[in-house]
Amino acid sequence: MLARHPDRFRVAVLTARRSAEELRRQETEFSPRRVVLADPDGAAPGAEIPGTWETGRDALLSAAEDPEVDVVVNALVGFAGLEPTLRALAAGKRVALANKESLVAGGSLVRQAMEEGGGELVPVDSEHSAILQCMNGAPRSVVERLVLTASGGPFRGWPASRLQSVGPEAALSHPTWDMGAKISIDSASLANKALEVIEAHVLYRMPFDRIGTVVHPQSIVHSFVEFVDGSVMAQLGFPTMEIPILYALSWPDRIADPELRTFDPVRSSPLTFEEIDHEAFPLFGVGVAAGRSGGVAPAVFNAANEVAVQAFLGGRLDFPGLARVAEFTLERLAGSTAESVEDLVAVDTEARGVAAGRIERGVSPSVPGGES
Amino acid sequence: MLARHPDRFRVAVLTARRSAEELRRQETEFSPRRVVLADPDGAAPGAEIPGTWETGRDALLSAAEDPEVDVVVNALVGFAGLEPTLRALAAGKRVALANKESLVAGGSLVRQAMEEGGGELVPVDSEHSAILQCMNGAPRSVVERLVLTASGGPFRGWPASRLQSVGPEAALSHPTWDMGAKISIDSASLANKALEVIEAHVLYRMPFDRIGTVVHPQSIVHSFVEFVDGSVMAQLGFPTMEIPILYALSWPDRIADPELRTFDPVRSSPLTFEEIDHEAFPLFGVGVAAGRSGGVAPAVFNAANEVAVQAFLGGRLDFPGLARVAEFTLERLAGSTAESVEDLVAVDTEARGVAAGRIERGVSPSVPGGES
């Protein structure tokens, strides 16, 4: 998409975690001044790593505050995205944020970095981009309620009993969005939607009881904002991340892109909406409750969930276990606090350890939380 | 609704055409300084008309420019609404416009009055209110397309053949909106939607090929705006005119009204969209073509349609005749022009005469336009 707008954007820095080959391809396409591979040891065996590239986590963090960069697109996966976000905001940059874990785990730190450094945060998540577009500068006092839409994932409509035995492959086949493994599992478990509710709370400073969620299997309406006068705004479009990415870069302006103009209400019909099935998807409620608890609970939820998702992908945890691991870890770390990013990293590490230990000991489906 | 916001609005002037009893009731409720009954001769026999009331069309026009009034809500029916709109705009007032015929017939005069007098026009029509909310101050350069929604009226899905014999009663029973007789018939014939397309063209200065229409039977989505970056905004709500009326009064702000907050996506599900059936509803195409022709054609279309609707309501014209009368009248007056409101009134009068004559002579279904 950026290649279609060379008059508006120049790629100054390119980074990747391990995907050396894709990074190489993009380097050829965009000719950035600087290329960073954060985790060269994790790259595919035999992958070529040019001597001009910088490598390692410190190089990644330095890239986030590169003085020639105006906009940092943070699409890192998981808690690892927090520090680059903090660095970029502290350096006064716009962060186009696709890493919701930053906000969920480190909401107050992120707000603090933004206020101190003068940076700004623009969401790339389709739901939060929709909310930004629906609010469009309106004061929070006229906003009654945010309603996030959820595709419902591949197991929408399944009873809880049938979800006992689903494996990673079924969970990875998302009906409407083409995404990475972590977010696909989060979407199947609705953990993703809980993270997004917390993200909306942090981004728009809305109380949790004024953030609703509705299942919308077609993923055409990306979210609603209800105003105090009964009017409701929605942002729609066929499910492509290119629209919210472009908007995060151009906001508050819009940049013409004929290739993205593919919406057709007749072709999108019907648009349906249904309630979340909390019995089948308890992880959603666990996550939102963590958000309501505040403090480090969202970070603990996120850490436990990241560990649980990896275990599920590796066949070491069943699907209902995702919720049980998160609940168990939240209970264990209920008294923890964090004042700094270092504290938060420590809490994150501890939560991962608790979650991993729980998974290793095996999660008993019959006595949830019983053998701790 | 106004009664719920005594801190924000005071009713200074009340007007009605003939409904003396309702006017009396509202006078008691709102204690206005001035009350005008425009057509006392048309009031119900024996209706009480207090001596404190002003009567007649001149009083109505004078009320539209009353110096103590900030906002004129113009909900007159038909072409008769044009002059009050022009007077109010010339006097620098906000006109909350529910009289789309003003704009359709006198678009350029309305724009001129607005520019000269400093008045502003805020639509009350739910579709145009939706567009205003979706655009929300965005420059026209980032707007790709407006898409108006249409309920489709009571005959949605009916084949053209079945529409030959429908009478006024069937046409008056609108599925989603509770409205007056004229607009109900216009909604059944889709003339209303053609008028709204022209209204959108005038209000938002959008070319006709960038104004689409889609049938949406639930009347929950009130219209869409597609932007140049592929993003689509929509405004939604349960079908009540109170939301767009309140917005027209409060724009660009919003006023809290808990009674209007009734939207529920699950209860609204499913939302469906379909194409207009041009064969069954030819009047829509006739009206939009009149809009494209420009000049006095929209005024002629509107006049012919007003006469045809009255004939249909009176049992003197069949349903397909609505389109034939409009088409015939447009052909007859194809060469007319108008430079002033007086010219336009003359064109309107002539068009009404042509349409009425055509109806009196009988409209032959087999040879449309043939016996002229």
Image (spheres, coloured by chain):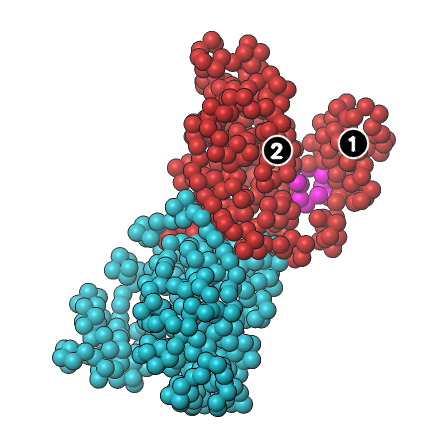
Chain colours: A red, B cyan
The amino acid at mark 2 is Ser
Q: Identify the residue under disc 2.
A: A173
Residue A171 appears in the picture as rendered: yes
- For the point 54% across and 90% down, the residue is B335
- For the point 45% across and 13% down, the residue is A366
- For the point 40% across and 54% down, the residue is B237
Q: Secondary structure at mark 2?
A: loop
Q: Is residue A361 above or below residue A174?
A: above
Q: CA distance from mark 1 to mark 2?
A: 25 Å
Residue A103 appears in the picture as rendered: no
* Disc 2: host chain: A
Residue A7 screen position, x and y as percent: 74, 55
Q: Is residue A27 left or right of residue B242?
A: right
Magenta residues span: A65-74
Residue B134 screen position, x and y as percent: 50, 58
* Disc 1: host chain: A
Q: Is residue A142 above or below residue B115?
A: above
Closest to the observer, B181 or A281: B181
Q: Main secondary structure of the magenta part?
A: loop
Q: Is residue B56 left or right of residue A257?
A: left
- For the point 25% across and 60% down, the residue is B3
Closest to the observer, A296 or A24: A24
Closest to the observer, B87 or B240: B240
The amino acid at mark 1 is Ala
Q: Identify the residue under disc 1.
A: A20
Residue A144 screen position, x and y as percent: 39, 46
**Magenta-drawn stretch contains B1:** no
Q: Is residue B203 left or right of residue A124?
A: left
Q: Is residue A184 left or right of residue B346?
A: right
Closest to the observer, B142 or B253: B142
